[in-house]
Image (spheres, rainbow, N blue to C red):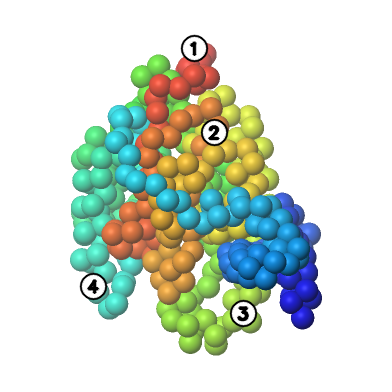
Amino acid sequence: MIRFLTSFFFLVSLALFFSVYISPEYFPYVGLATLTIPLLLVINGVLFIALVFAKRKLALLPLVALVIGWKFVGVTIQLRTEPEVEKGLSVLSYNVHMFSYNKNGDGKSSISKNLIQWLKENPSDVKCFQEFYHDPTTPSRNTLKQLGKETGYNHFYQVIQGNPKSSTFGMAIFSRYPIVNEGVVLDSRSTNGIIFADIKVEKDTFRIYNVHLESMNIPSDGLSDFEGIKENYRQTLRKLKRGQVARASQLEILMEHMENSPYPNILVGDFNDVPYSYTYFTLRNIMDNGFEKAGKGFGFTYNKVLFFLRIDNIFYDQDLGILDFKTHSEVDYSDHYPVSAIFSLDKPNIKPLSTEE
């Protein structure tokens, strides 16, 4: 029996470890199965210890599985102390839930006020927002003014839906440094999209990508507790499948655009995918991840019952250096937690601003 179980978990582990490199466009449900990877690592660890104590050569199988799957440990948890951070380019990413998150029946207006105040006080040089809301007709909801002009930030705001004369929502990039170019990579009729801005920092220029990849479109009340998840699991599975396929297609568009970037890329946002996904590992092959290189703990970014999800990320080109990464889990004004990173400005291979621009 132990031989069967060991062999079974070994084969399943290998299949799932390598499945993160297969696009959901070809195997849509594989992405759901990869959510069990942390559990498989634990099972293989237990089997290895038990077989070693039993002096069984069979212990080689879970050992091989652990060696191959070790990279998933690093994307799951990081153990490091707080660094002494030098000055650099600081970048914040936050899905602000339209500034209207209502947690535990709290008033939306008070949460919105607290969130905007926190963002005003946050010292990040660049701030990227998903599900950004703006209403120029209401002073307390005039977010472009409050977070932009009043605090000394340039901004690029891409409207996704709404009337610019009244209320709109979309995606935004705010910067203390000059924005010398901006554009839209992916426009969407929903709340999703991809935008970029070229930020000139002294003699260097960085391209900041702000992404909000395909959402699950699962009603919030369906994820408010485990009973809601159980009642809606069939519908939820279908939406998870559709979301994974859509994100794979969006990822192709994004990667092609980044390949043609004349500057070092910093990619931030709400990816709506966990670290054991095709999206994450495709990006991980060509970029470094802020949490893996400078974060600590588990870095969970989802502020609902499925609290164990890390779906907000900061990736960056491998010729850049990172000094710090934080998940601000104390800031619970949205259904996501903000994440931030500080990048070194003392790195080679950073292309200067072209004189033609």
How far apart marks 4 and 3 lie (CA) works out to 30 Å
Q: Is residue 245 left or right of residue 96?
A: right
Which residue bears the numbered disc 3?
Answer: 235
Sequence-wise, the earlier of marks 2 and 4 is 4
Instruction: Name the residue type under label 3.
Output: Gln
Which residue bears the numbered disc 1?
Answer: 355
Which residue bears the numbered disc 4?
Answer: 107
Sequence-wise, the earlier of marks 4 and 1 is 4
Instruction: Name the residue type under label 4.
Output: Gly
Q: Is residue 30 visible?
A: no
Q: Identify the element where label 2 is drawn.
A: strand
How far apart marks 2 and 4 lie (CA) works out to 41 Å
Say if mark 3 contacts mark 2, CB within 8 Å: no
Sequence-wise, the earlier of marks 4 and 3 is 4
Other-residue count near label 1 (Cα within 10 Å), few / some / many at <14 / 14–19 / ≥20: few
How far across and down, in percent of the image, does residue 173 sit?
40, 41
Sequence-wise, the earlier of marks 1 and 2 is 2
Q: Is residue 293 left or right of residue 341?
A: right
Look at 43% across and 74% down and name the residue there. 305
Other-residue count near label 4 (Cα within 10 Å), few / some / many at <14 / 14–19 / ≥20: few
Say if mark 1 contacts mark 3, CB within 8 Å: no
Q: Residue 317: which numbered mark, if any?
A: 2
